[in-house]
Image (cartoon, rainbow, N blue to C red):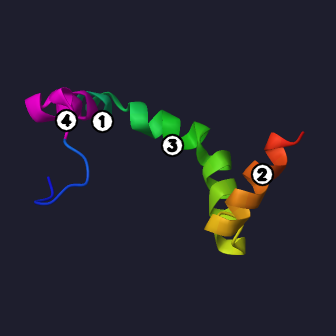
Amino acid sequence: MKLMRKRKPSLKTVLGVTKAKRQIKKSLGVYEVTKVLNAPKNAERRFKRKMGLNSGIVVFIRNLFKLFK
């Protein structure tokens, strides 16, 4: 964990529950399956980031248009 945090950690994080769950999923190979299933969405997100479509002002404008639909 980092020395300085913006938020206080959750109880599960402090007790190590989150880390244990992650280790179990990794050992079972769950992440190998989800990596394949999430690949199209990840590629889309990388493309949008590269094109600048996830910058602060663009997201603000997009959300503004969603309000008036």
Q: Return the mark for residue 64.
A: 2
Nearest the eye: 61 or 40: 61
Q: Which of marks 2 and 4 is in front?
A: 2
Work out how far the residue at label 1 is from the one at label 2, CA to CA, in angstroms. Answer: 40 Å
Q: What stretch is highlighted in magenta?
A: 9-23
Q: Name the residue under label 3.
A: 35
Q: Mark 4 points at which residue?
A: 19
The reply to whether the magenta stretch includes residue 65 is: no
Relative height, residue 69 to residue 42 (above, below): above
Residue type for callout 4: Lys
What is the quadrant of the C terminus in the image?
Answer: top right
Pointer 3 or 1: first along the chain:
1
Q: Where is residue 3 in the image (x, y as percent from the top left)?
A: 10, 60
Work out how far the residue at label 4 is from the one at label 1, CA to CA, in angstroms. Answer: 11 Å
Question: Disc 3 vs disc 2: Cβ atoms closer than 8 Å?
Answer: no
Q: Mark 1 points at which residue?
A: 26
